[in-house]
Amino acid sequence: MEEVGAQEVSAVEEVAEVKRVPVESNNGRKPEGGGPRNSVFTWFMVLALLGVWSSVAVVWFGLVDYDSVIARARQFRGNFSEVLQGKLRAYDADRDGDFDVEDAKVLLGLKQKPVSVVQPAEPRQQLDDVPGLTAEDDDVDGSQMLKLESEIQAAVPLPPPSEEEFVPDDSSKHSVLDEHPYEDKLNTIDTKGELVEESQPQETLEESGPYEDQSGSQYIHKPASEPEPHTEPSSEPQSQGEQESAAEPQAEPAASESTGSVSEQPEEKLIDKVKKKKPKLLNKFDKTIKAEIEAADKLRKKGIAEEAVRAFEALVQQYPHSPRCRYGKAQAEDDMAEKKRSNEMLQKAINTYREASELPSATPDLVRASLKRRAERQQFLGRMRGALATLEKLVQIFPEDLSLKNDLGVSYLLLGDNHSARRVYEEVLAVAPDDGFAKVHYGFILKSENKIAESIPYLREGLESGDPGTDDGRFYFHLGDALQRVGDNSVSYTHRHTHTLPPSITVLSVLQAYEWYARGHQRGHFASVWQRSLYNVKGLRAQPWWTPQETGYTDLVKALEKNWRVIRDEALSVMDTSTGLFLPEEENLREKGEWGQFTLWQQGRKAGEACRSVPRTCSLLERYSEATGCKRGQIKFSVMQPGTHVWPHTGPTNCRLRMHLGLVIPKQGCKIRCTNDTRVWEEGKVLIFDDSFEHEVWQDSDSYRLIFIIDVWHPELSQHQRQVLSPI
C-alpha cells in the first residue's frame, strides 16, 4: 500500500512540473524555458491609452490656454519683424524709409545705389533735431554694404528680382477726358455743390466725353463715376499727369498704335511706361513715426473713413509740423466726403491739402501730390478758377514738369479760355514735340477754331503716340470728323468702299476717317463704326431707322400726323426773322448755308416762354411724357434754307430716338442720310431714326424746308432709368 501511495504522489508531482509556468525575473528577462510573447505589446498599449486619456483631460478640462500660446507666437513674430526691420533700416539705400528688395539689390551689387539729389524746395532738417536719429544712422558706406551682403545671403534669402518697385494703393486711372459735363453721377457730390441722392441705373453708362455734340468745340468738366467701396476716391477727373495717385503713383500702359491692344506693344515700351519713381512723401522726421502713420493710413485704405480721420487728427495734434500726417488727414477727409456725400467735408479736405503743401519741411513729392489733388477736388466742386490758381502755383514750383503744364492747359479749356490753353500747349510742344497729350489737345483747339486741315496731324500723331490721356473716344471722333470734312462728302459711303474710287486725296481722307472710327470701335469707344455716341446705356436696341410700331409710341405719331397743319401754322406765324425766335445753329455742324431752330423743350423742361408763341402745339405735346420728359433730348422747329449742307455727325447719346414731322417740304432737293440709307421727308408724315448713328442732311431745293423735331426716350429704357439719367 505504501508503495502504491508513493507512486501516485510521484505522478502528481510530474504533472505539476509539466504545467508549471515560468515566471519573469524582476529585470524583465525571461528565465530559461521562455514565457509569453505579448509583454512588450501590452506595455505599448498601456502607454498609448495613458497618452490618449491625458490629451482628452487637457482639452476637456482646459488645462492649457492655446489662444494665449498662439497670441504670444504672433506677438513674437511681429516683434521680431519690427526689430529686424529697424536694424536693417540703417541700410536703406534708396532712402524710402525701410529696408526692402530694392535695397537688397543695391547691397548685393545687382543695382547701383541711387544718387540722392537735394531739391532746393525741401529745406533739409537737422539730424540733431530729430529724435532717435544720428548722423551715423543716416550714413551707409561701402564697407557696411560689403559686410551686410554675406549676412543677408546667409540669414534672409532674397526673392527673385521684380520689375515692380511698389504696389499702388489707388487704381483710379481716368484722364480728364473721361469726364462728361452732362452725366451727373448719382449718389455722389455734384459739381454745383448739391447732394444727389438718386441711385444709378442698372445698365452701365459708357460716357467718355464732355461735349454737347461730338462735333462741338466746348470743353466742359464733369466728375467721373463713383469709386468702388474701400478704394481711393476717384470721382474727380484726372489729367495726363494723373498716372500718380494722391497717395501712391500708378503708371498706365499706353495703348497700341495700330490696334489699340496694350499687350501688342513692345515689352521695353511697356516696362518703360509702367516703371515709375516711387514718391518720397516722408521727410526725416516722418520716417521716425512711420509706423504710426501707416497704422492710421491702414484704416483709410480699409475704408474706415471716420476712424482714419480721428487717427490722423490725433497725429496732427501730436506732430503739428509733420507734412505726412497732415496729408494723411486730408486724404481721410477726402474719403469721408465721398462716403458721406458731404461738400462741407470735401472743402475741409481741400483746405488740409493746402496746409500740408505749405509746411516748410514738406518734401517736393508731397507738395506736388497735395496741390494736384487739391486742384482736382476744386474742379469737382465746380470751382474752376480756384483750381486754375492751384495749378498755376504748381507750375511755378515745378516749371520743368510738363505733365503739370498739360493739366494747366486742361484747366484753361474748362474755363473756355482756349487762347491761354493754346499758349500752354505750344510751350509744351516747343520743349517736347512728341508729347502726345499736348498734341491731341492742341489739335482739338485748332479744330474748334475751324482750322480743320491743320488739326489733323496733331490729332493723328497724338493718338498714335499711345501716351496716357490720349486714348479717348472724342479724339478718335474729332480726327475722323476732320478727315471727313476735308474729304469729298458728296461721295456715298457705298462708293467710298468700292475699288472704283477715283484716286483723289479727298476720297482717301474719307476712307482714313472711317479707319479711325473703326479703331475707336476696336478700342471700345464706339458701339460701332456708324454709332459713335459717347453717352450711352449699354444693351439698348440699336438700329438707324425705326417704325412707329417698333417704338411703341404710335399714339404720339398719330397725334402729330393728325394735327400737322395746326403745328405748321403756328410755326409759320413765328418764323419771321423779326421775331428773333429762330436762332442760328451754333454747333459747327454746317459746311454751308443757313439753318435756324426754335426750341420749345430742352432737357425735359420748357424753354422759357417759348410755348406762349405756339400754345396749341405745346398743349398737344404735354399729353406725351415720353417726349416732354425726355431729359436727353429737345423739341424744336427746324428751318433750313436752300444751299445748306450739314456735315456727317452723330448725336451725343443712344438714350433717345428722334422724330421728324414734315411741315413745309420742297418737292425735290431735300434728303437725309442715316448710315447708308437715304430718305426724304413728306408733309404730314413722321420719320423716326436713332441720331446716335451717323447722319447727314442736304438742302438743294429752291425754297426753305421746315420740320418739327421731337426727341423721345428710347423705348427700352425703364421708368427708373428715365428718372435718374442726367440731362443732355
Image (cartoon, grey):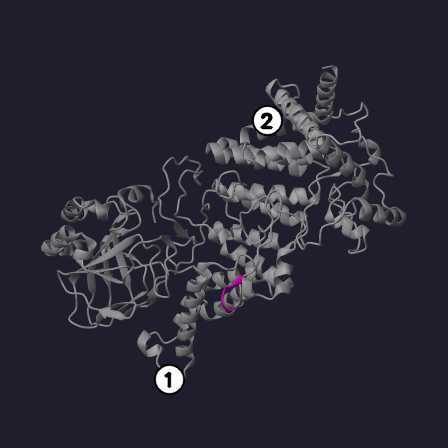
Q: Is residue 81 magenta?
A: no
Residue at (29% x, 44% y) in the render:
722
Where is residue 182 drawn, in percent x and y? 39, 48
Where is residue 384 drawn, in percent x and y? 50, 44
10 Å neighbourhood of mark 2: few (<14), some, or many (≥20)? some
Q: Quadrant of residue 360?
A: top right
Task: State which region is magenta.
Answer: 258-262
Q: Is residue 292 above or below residue 502?
A: above
10 Å neighbourhood of mark 1: few (<14), some, or many (≥20)? few
Q: Which residue is mark 2?
A: 310
Type of amino acid under label 1: Pro
* Relative depth, front residue between 328 and 673: 328
Q: Which mark is residue 142?
A: none
Type of amino acid under label 2: Arg
Q: Is residue 92 above or below residue 302?
A: below
Residue at (25% x, 70% y) in the render:
677
Q: In terms of secondary structure, where does tag 2 sit?
A: helix
Residue at (49% x, 39% y) in the render:
229
Left or right: where does residue 601 sit relative to residue 480?
A: left
Q: Quadrant of residue 126?
A: top right
Q: Which mark is residue 502?
A: 1
Q: Quadrant of the N terminus?
A: top right
* Relative depth, front residue between 574 and 91: 91
Q: Is residue 181 above or below residue 258?
A: above
Q: In terms of secondary structure, where does tag 1 sit?
A: loop
Q: Earlier in the sequence, mark 1 or mark 2?
A: 2
* Relative depth, front residue between 90 and 54: 54
Q: Is residue 581 visible?
A: no
Left or right: where does residue 64 sit relative to residue 114?
A: left
Which SS type dominates the magenta stretch? loop
Where is residue 281 drawn, in percent x and y? 68, 41
Residue at (57% x, 41% y) in the render:
374
